[in-house]
Amino acid sequence: MKNTRYWTLHLAAGLVMFFLLAIHMAIFHLDYILGYEEPLSYSSVVMRAKQFFYLVMYILLLGAGLYHGLYGFRRIVFELSIGRVLEKILTVCIVAAGVVMFICGAFVVIGMFV
């Protein structure tokens, strides 16, 4: 039952990433339609970083991407039948790495917002 919940979260994270990346791509590739003349210029990047919508979008994208990628990596490694002890060690290492990466990424995004 526990694995089903994690797999469902994995799929949900994939869907969240799909929609957030669609928004992200639309902003950068439909720039003239949306009113951004130079979406990659420093002033446009800073302007977007100061908006709450983008703060939430980037934090959600960071969390969903990390969970989706690290859980998928964990499942692939578990296919190798590495043993229960190594599976637990790997899980702890992956969770720790994910938390550190999320904190670092969130620090950057929130730092640009403030």
Image (cartoon, rainbow, N blue to C red):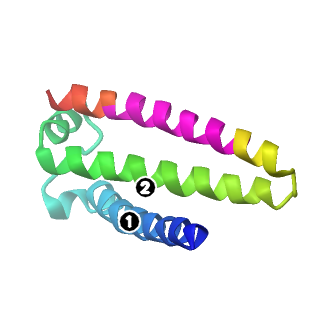
Nearer to the camera, 110 or 1:
1
Helix, strand or loop at label 2? It is helix
What's under tag 1, amino acid-wise?
A: Val
Judged left or right of residue 93, residue 46 is left
Relative height, residue 17 to residue 69 (above, below):
below
The answer to which of 18 and 90 lies nearer the viewer is 90
Q: Amino acid at mark 2?
A: Ala
Instruction: Please give left or right for residue 23 compared with residue 73 in the image.
Output: left
Tag of residue 88: none
User: How many neighbours does mark 1 have within 10 angstroms: few (below 14), some (14-19), or many (20 or more)?
Assistant: some
Q: Earlier in the sequence, mark 1 or mark 2?
A: 1
User: In the figure, 94 relative to 57: above or below?
Assistant: above
Picture residue at 22% right of the left edge, 49% below the top: 56
Residue 64, numbered circle: 2
Q: Position of residue 97 (x, y in %)?
A: 57, 34
The answer to whether 34 appears left or right of 30 in the picture is left
Q: Write the start and end of the magenta stretch as one range.
A: 90-106
Label 1 sits on residue: 16
Q: Is residue 103 magenta?
A: yes
The residue at 78%/53% (across/down) is 77
